[in-house]
Amino acid sequence: MQQRDGHLIFSPSDLNAFLECEHLTRLELEVTRGLRSRPAVDNPQARLIQAKGEEHERRYLDALRADGKRVVTIDRGGGGAGGGGWELERAASDTLAAMRSGADVVFQAVLLGEGWRGFADFLERVETPSDLGSWSYEVADT
């Protein structure tokens, strides 16, 4: 969840969190609005799982490139998993440009639309017609 220009922007994960626990959503909203700070938690197991996930993602990306796929990497600009500090509009525009160009793979895609934002590890081209042309994309998250 983010607040940009006075408007809230949600992710699919925010929707899942709301369905699981409305109180969690209330707490996240308070953090987003600056009314509460997120508690600091040192979780070595979470860091290990994150590192393993990043390693798996790198191996998958290397395999795509080794298969000769044209991969376009979207520069998110930093800021972490919550999206804070990312230049979302620019990154979403770069994602759309890569999709329009027919790239085989869009790595670290950013999608924005009508109060929602989403991040995909990979968008992979499939030969199904869409507004883009004779191709479209499917999400592949590692």
Image: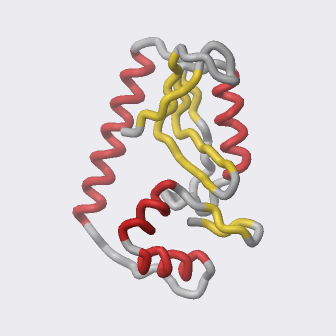
Which residue ends up furthest to the right in the rendered image?
5
- Spot occupied by residue 137 in the image (x, y as percentages of width and height): 54, 27
Residue shown at 69%/36% (left/top)?
Answer: 94
Residue 11 image-quadrant placement: bottom right
43, 22: nearer the viewer: 22
Q: Residue furthest left?
A: 45
Picture quarter with the N terminus: bottom right
As drawn, 99 above or below 77: above
Q: Position of residue 23 (x, y in %)?
A: 42, 80
Q: Is residue 67 left or right of residue 48?
A: right
**Which residue is pictured at 27% across the width and 46% down the height?**
52
Q: How many numbered circles does the render carry?
A: 0
| Left or right: residue 42 compared with residue 3 | left
- Residue 44 position within the rendered picture, expressed as x and y whole percent measured from the top left: 25, 65
Q: Position of residue 53 (x, y in %)?
A: 32, 45
Q: Quadrant of the C terminus?
A: top left
Outermost residue toward the front in this view: 19
Q: Nearer the viewer, residue 48 or 136?
A: 136
Which one is nearer the viewer's eye here, 81 or 10? 10
Looking at the picture, does residue 106 appear above or below residue 26? Answer: above
Q: Is residue 30 above or below residue 98?
A: below
Q: Nearer the viewer, residue 61 or 95?
A: 95
Taking 106 as reference, is 58 left or right? left
Quadrant in which residue 135 is drawn: top right
- Residue drawn at point x = 65 percent, y = 48 percent: 112
Q: Residue at horizontal 42%, vertical 60%?
A: 16
Question: As drawn, is 96 to the left or to the right of 28?
Answer: right
